[in-house]
Amino acid sequence: MKYKLYILPLIFILITSGCALITDEYQANQRKVIAYLLEDLPLPDDAEIVKAPTVLLGTGESISGRIILTSNFSPAENLIFYGTETLSTGWRLISSKVGEEVTLVYAKNGRFATIYLSPKETFQGFMTGDYGSDIDISVVHPDAIGVQNPYDQLEYEDLPETP
């Protein structure tokens, strides 16, 4: 009877710690993939990848896609990070908008990277008066769109009719 009381907390601990291990493993694996595909675009060390909306296509300099991150640093701190780190990797700032939300557009070898930083309010930030950032990075390669109008040859007569 005493053993049953010890089993329930043990099972709970195993289940909850397993979730953290899966999340940490996902973050580590995603960082490896992103580092391989976007080796020349710096990412903040503390940033965590948001799983669902992140999509990357291609490899090397032909990469296109979108990466969504969260960071514990404010948009202003991330602005300083990107202002410093992107220059050291050859990206050139071509446009910016700085306010409560920050938009940075960089170019390198015909590729364009748009970095959008917005405040992320958290309970911890509310208590300490600080807040983190949501980071949305879109990278486009000029050859990502081969056909400018893929619908040009579409025959409307062949489409099924809608009710």
Image: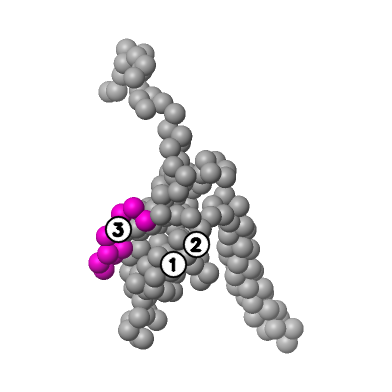
Compared across the picture, whether 127 is left or right of 89 comes to left
Whether pointer 1 and pointer 2 mark residues with C-beta atoms closer than 8 Å, the reply is: yes
Above or below: residue 53 compared with residue 75: above
**Is the residue under label 3 in contact with that under label 2 (CB below 8 Å)?**
no
Which circle marks residue 20 in the picture? none
Q: In the rendered image, which residue does mark 1 sit on?
A: 84
Q: Judge by depth and name the residue closer to the eye, 4 or 66.
A: 66
Task: Determine the CA span between mark 3 and mark 1.
Answer: 14 Å
> Mark 3 highlights which residue?
96
Residue type pointed to by label 1: Thr
State which tag comes first along the sequence, 2 or 3: 2
Looking at marks 3 and 1 on the same chain, the residue that comes earlier in the sequence is marked by 1
- Mark 2, residue position: 88
Label 1 packing within 10 angstroms: few (<14), some (14-19), many (20+): few
Relative horizontal placement of residue 128, taking residue 23 as reference (left or right): left
**SS state under label 3:** strand
Segment tinted magenta in the rendering: 93-102
Q: Indicate how the structure is coloured in the image.
A: one colour
State left or right for residue 50 relative to residue 149: right
Residue 123 position in % (x across, y down): 37, 79
Label 2 environment density (alpha carbons within 10 Å; few <14, some 14–19, many ≥20) = few
Q: Secondary structure at mark 2?
A: helix
